[in-house]
Image (cartoon, rainbow, N blue to C red):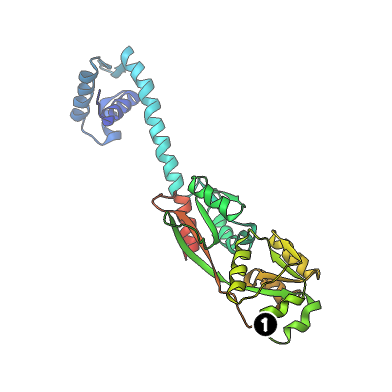
Amino acid sequence: MNISLELYRIFYVVAKEGSVSKAADVLFISQPAITYQIKRLETQLGVNLFTRTKHGMVLTDEGKVLFGYVKNGLENISNGENALSNIKNLDSGTIRIGASITICRNILMPYLEEFHKKYPNIDIKINNNVSDNLMKELRNGNLDILVMFSPSNDTKDLVIKPITEVQDIFVGNKEYYDLTNDTKNIKDLKSYPLILPGVTSSSRTHLNNFLKENNVSLIPKLEVVSYSLIVDLIKSGFGIGYVTREFVKNELDNKSLYEIKTKEKAKKRSIVMVTMDKKEPNYSVKKLVEMINK
């Protein structure tokens, strides 16, 4: 049967109110129109749904059976509409974000704090994996958004929006303060113990490309995957490290680290927001994206 939902809605209100006149007041429809629609529904179903009495409309046995199903159906629809309204009003929802711990702490945190203050009922789930794995998770539909250094691989299926640019530099603790008196050549750093990012990191790839452009080879004393551990090792005097200036701003300001300037400078890197092309994000994700874009 192809029966209009509106007929069931009218039937529900009449049954609930027990009166055509009261149903007319609720639905803002004339009494003759309601009577006509009820008769139309009864004709299509082939049963009598009401017994008309001087006291109002009384459900028949068949009408009682139908009413139970219609009541559940309309209430489910109403609940669904309310759920959508809650999502639109950001009273509920989930955002799944992929980003490294370093980018979360130094780039994302201010946005997440602002978003959480405005929309405290939105759940935020963060996956701190390596970039290649996060990209797979995004493409598999397990993440809504990535915040990462600009990807260099195939990006045809992605939407990439820049957030900010950062500059990689060499730094040391106070033991290397003398190196800050003048600008060095990259090759001058060969004679010092070096702490470099792990070979699989995007930071190391960027550094290797930079060194290759300048025909320089640097052999690290330590290779470390964890960015925070690199900073701790530099501060403890294990050697000169390669870090991102914007991520060690506090350390540079409080003089626990010192920048060792070089004549050759690595190109700035873009930190970007990545989403899937041709995939409509949920309302919560849209709001966070709008906030970051501002």
Task: Place residue 271 in its image quadrant.
Answer: bottom right
Q: Quadrant of the N terminus?
A: top left
Q: Position of residue 244 (x, y in %)?
A: 64, 70
Mark 1, other Cα within 10 Å: few <14 / some 14–19 / many ≥20: few
Instruction: Name the residue nearer the viewer: 238 or 160.
Output: 238
Q: Position of residue 293 (x, y in %)?
A: 47, 64
At mark 1, the secondary structure is loop
Could you tell whether 26 is left or right of 31 in the image? right
Residue drawn at point x = 50 percent, y = 47 percent: 91
Instruction: Name the residue nearer the viewer: 60 or 122.
Output: 122
Q: As displayed, is residue 264 above or below residue 128?
A: below
Residue drawn at point x = 25 percent, y = 15 percent: 48
Q: Position of residue 85 (x, y in %)?
A: 42, 45
Q: As displayed, is residue 279 above or below residue 248?
A: above
Could you tell whether 257 is left or right of 61 in the image? right
Furthest toward the top, the residue is 61
Answer yes or no: is residue 211 visible.
Answer: yes
Q: As displayed, is residue 126 above or below residue 20?
A: below
Answer yes or no: is residue 258 visible.
Answer: no
Q: Position of residue 132 (x, y in %)?
A: 56, 53
Q: Mark 1 highlights which residue?
A: 185
Could you tell whether 180 is left or right of 287 in the image? right
Q: As displayed, is residue 279 above or below residue 239?
A: above
Residue kind at label 1, given as amino acid type:
Asn
Instruction: Name the residue nearer the viewer: 267 or 219.
Output: 219
Task: Place residue 178 in its image quadrant.
Answer: bottom right
